Amino acid sequence: MSEVVIVMGSKSDAETMKNCETYLNYFGISYDVKIMSAHRNPEEVSEFSKNADKNGVKIIIAAAGMAAHLGGVIAAHTVLPVLGVPMKGGAMDGLDALLSMVQMPAGVPVPTLAIGNAGARNAAITAVQILALNNDDLKQKLIEFKKMGSKL
């Protein structure tokens, strides 16, 4: 399995999360994509989360909308960093997803990015920043990225 895994609660999140994939590709980060719901596939989410570390995963990016429990459920079952990306849509156009991610109980953090496309891009960049802590080549690529105005 790759160092980064993008987990989406629904196939409908894929278009937004292509932004994340574009940035991971730019930095040369291998990643896997999984679609599983905290509500519809709870056993699959639990099993993935419990085994991610021993499968070589370093960072999980969890994208979800509405109740957005995916990141929290994953974080409850792993010691790996889980970055949350709230999806636009629903009755509150993503605000509900944002609030459910950032209002995690103490001890179960889900660092959360912006709603939608910007959040997907920033999740990838944050993952790269974390991986660059132990990778000087990646760190140099980040420096160049910043010099370019942090845009592709």
Image (cartoon, rainbow, N blue to C red):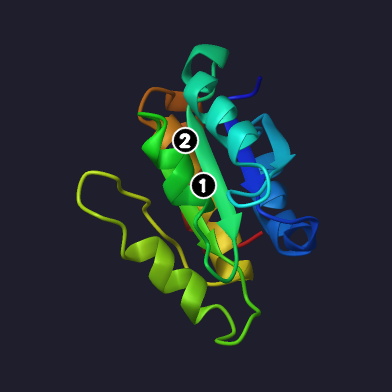
> 147 left or right of 41?
left
Amino acid carrying mark 2 in the image? Gln
Residue 43 image-quadrant placement:
top right
- Residue 98 in the image: x percent, y percent? 45, 71
Count of numbered badges drawn on the protein: 2
Q: Quadrant of the C terminus?
A: bottom right
Q: Residue 144 has which mark?
A: 1
Marks 1/2: CA–CA distance: 6 Å
Q: Relative to the observer, which residue lies in front, 124 or 33? A: 33
Up-down: is 26 above or below 120? above
In this orientation, which residue lies closer to the viewer: 22 or 82?
82
Q: Quadrant of residue 135?
A: top left
Foreground residue among 95 and 22:
95
CB atoms of marks 1 and 2 within 8 Å: yes
Residue 141 showing in the rendered view: no
Question: What residue is pinned by disc 2?
Answer: 140
Q: Position of residue 42 (x, y in %)?
A: 59, 41
Residue lying at 61% horizontally and 70% vertically, measured from the top left = 116
Amino acid under label 1? Answer: Glu
- What residue lies at 35% left-to-right and 64% top-to-bottom? 102
Coordinates of residue 68 in the picture (x, y in percent): 53, 62
